[in-house]
Amino acid sequence: MKEIIKKIVRAQKCNASGGQSSKNTDDVKVSKKLADNKTFLKNSFKNSTDIIYYEFEGYSGEKALIVYIDGMVDKKTLNRDVIDPFIAGSKEVEFEEEFEDSEKLKSLIHVANIQEARMVSEVIDAILCGDTAMFFEGTNTAFIIDSKGWEKRAVAEPDTEAVVRGPREGYVESIRVNTALLRRKIKNVNLVFESLKLGRQTKTDVAIAYIDGIVNREVLGEVRKRINAIDTDSILESGYIEQYIEDNHFSPLATVGNTQKPDIVAAKILEGRVAIFCDGTPHVLTVPNLFIENIQSAEDYYVRPYIASILRIIRLVSFLISVLVPALYVALSTYHQEMIPSVLLVTMAGAREGIPLPALAEAFLMILMFELLRESGTRLPRPVGSAISIVGALVVGEAAVNAGLVSAPMVIVVAVTAVASFIVPALTEVMTFYRFILLFLGGMLGLYGITCGVFVMVTQAASLHSFGVPYTSPMSPLNLEGMKDYGLRFPLWSMIKRPGSIAKENKKRRG
Amino acid sequence: MNKTAVKRVISLILIISFAPAASGCWNRHELNTLGILGALAVDMEGEKYKLTFEIIKPKPAAGSKKGGGEKDEPVKFIQSTGDSLLDALRNATLSFDRKIFMPHAKAYIFSEEVARKGLLNYIDFLQRDHETRRTTYILIAKGSSAAEMLNATGGIEDIPSNYIERLIEGQKFNSKSLSIRLLDFLKYYYERGKQPVIGIIQKKEKAIKEAGGEKGKTEYELSVEGAAVFFEEKLVGFLNGMETRGLNFIMGKMYSGIIVSPSPDGEGINSVEILTSGSKNDVEIKGKEAKLKVKINITGMLEEELAKIGTKDPEVIEKIEKANSQEVKNEIEGVIGKVQQEYKSDIFGFGEVVHRKYPGEWKKIQKDWNDIFSRAEVNVEVETKITRTGLTNDPVNKRED
């Protein structure tokens, strides 16, 4: 199947190339004449109406052109700190007839971040990012003034990763805010952000974050290599990047992790991982992503070790429950009735009396029903969502049993499965996938089928690598230092080294 | 797609299509097609096998109880006859609508007649089939037919087979019965130096009527007191409750029990509850004569003392211990004597001891062992240690005058 898909992709690539030719703006320099610059920009932007061109004459007679995108700049800054000084004039800076001294001009602009650009393409990119471009008659450099200021969502607690103990702040859609949130956690010169732009059309800002000296060099090199190899029109969410750089596109288990919380990202890059920030989304990617990271929660490290360990074991068990219980129920009740305790068997048989469907079909329908309810509940606005859950609970739980369509134990099994599947949010989709496969295997072949299915799944997981790190480490290959943070969360003081499967240099955390 | 990929896909499809074949017996049965067997009773009817099945009815869900005060019977009885056990089993489906599901059977009950003819003809199927379990209890119905045992309920359990199972498991409280599984019977049978014993079950008229029971109607309950003694595969006789307890002492299967002995000084009696009991059997062989030695160690707790002698004095305790030991000794000598004289069947497993101790001689005397056993001299030693005397030292009937 891989081969077929690769072939199709290759065929499409051939068609696509040639359609996108690079524009001729690449080698055009900023002109000394304002009018030329203006016309060129207007042509480049195809007279798009959200681009504002503002020409004015300053106190000393200097002619200037300001170009920006409406809605992306902070107009207060622009008016007060950029335009006002020129119009009001300044005693310190006296201009001769020629306005060529860019240093003098620059000193009039009261903004911290000003860059000079000589190429029009640079200017265009900057304008697209929300900066303001400023041209002067007679100078062949343009000023790129950092005046970004658009509507942003406030930093808030993410819905999906709520904690009882721990920081509540979560990432937002702006990459600058996000990197700053991380910098506030790690005040260290070694925290490095490498910026690049991805997406031929979208030109999305992407930043690779790591801590120099701790990061696993091989992983970092691999991340750079894979990100640079991305060649696509658009990056609208970090999920796009994830799907381009992940190790195995056909594996249900994700080899790239994501989170919305700065404290989690900080902890991960302190273990030697690499984080990838993408503008326009609160989801930050972290690599390598190992299986156990799905089970870990930020809170595990903030509460005391006993309770953290218990919770983590509960999460592991609930993963197994969610994946296996419907399949085991169907397999035991249709093939291996001798394995069910007598008293339970009699009760179960009583509940199944008069149920028209075979157990497999019953289980399938109930789980499908649950998935429908879950999906409809997720996308709907809150008030309607609760209506759905009432209908679901009443119709599925109560009416179906009373009507004799579904047996009560099956409802319990599906309910337990559903509850368990929410305990590990990172794996919910994977669990659904596995659950259906095992359910069919269990319903067709009994425990033998389940055993085969689990065998294949475990083998597949063990064969995965995430950026060169085995997916199932530190369990396999065994790494004792890493096992301190596996099923049991050892006390923080006992975790002297960073997890050995990831950190290769500067291994010591303490002591 | 290249050739190796095609090969891979084809082999994958082949593997998947072969997978169902490897799963063995294709025995998919929905729960509502099964008749769960609770207990099986085996009788003879002329030359034919007559089986009685107790099928447990699926318990209706608590919420969906039908109205009306009429109580639903929890089980259904089916009878069928056939030329062999399996034949009779299959004949049951002629008149019963569900597949009889055997793994959950609690007990197989064989009638006395069947047992006297020889059990082996009946249990081959039970130990061969994949659906039956060897850990199911087996019982011999004493006095009446095996089928009759199934419809007497004297306990709390609604389901007769559960009632029977609980009775068998009560062995650990009274030690006057045996809990023998099919597996144990086969083990005893194949061991040369030990003859089989099986628990028994009998129907008794109830001494006290049920509350609200009909007048004039006799009510029955079951009792598992006693044991059935076999020689090879055939039933040769029974032991009563006390004799069975002696047997349990020797076999080391005493888990609890009350020994009542006359008080050494006074005129009353003492009851000692057995906490632990260990046995050590030994045999000495001289030519064709054997000497059987049984050594029992008991720790007990004095539970009743009705002789007006306080138990503060260690000497008194010592006396009680002796009396208790004597009582147990009599019991054991009694049961060995009875088996030696009446049944000539070494149900205690002394032959095993000989086999281990004198492997060479055992080969010579193996065939005559049961004769040698029945002639053998018996030496029983019992030692009792009373470790606790309850919450008080003085008996309740002792008054300070």
Image (cartoon, rainbow, N blue to C red):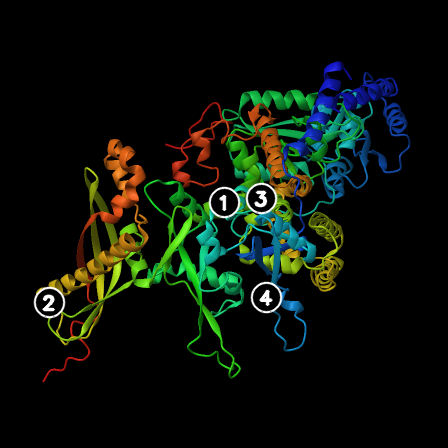
Rounded to the nearest whole Å, what is the CA distance between mark 2 and mark 3? 64 Å
Image mark 1: chain:
A
- Identified at 53% across, 39% down, the residue is A185
- Identified at 26% across, 54% down, the residue is B336
Q: Amino acid at mark 2?
A: Val
Q: Position of residue A241 (x, y in %)?
A: 70, 30
Rounded to the nearest whole Å, what is the CA distance between mark 4 and mark 2? 54 Å
Under circle 2, the secondary element is: helix
Rounded to the nearest whole Å, what is the CA distance between mark 1 and mark 2? 58 Å
Tag 2 residue: B316
Residues behind callouts 4 and 3 on a single chain: no
Quadrant assignment for the C terminus of chain B: bottom left
Image mark 4: chain:
B
Rounded to the nearest whole Å, what is the CA distance between mark 4 and mark 3? 39 Å
Image mark 2: chain:
B
Tag 1 residue: A313
Under circle 3, the secondary element is: helix
Tag 4 residue: B74
Rounded to the nearest whole Å, what is the CA distance between mark 1 and mark 4? 42 Å
Q: Which badge, 4 or 2, comes first in the chain's sequence?
A: 4
Which dot marks residue A299?
none
Under circle 1, the secondary element is: helix
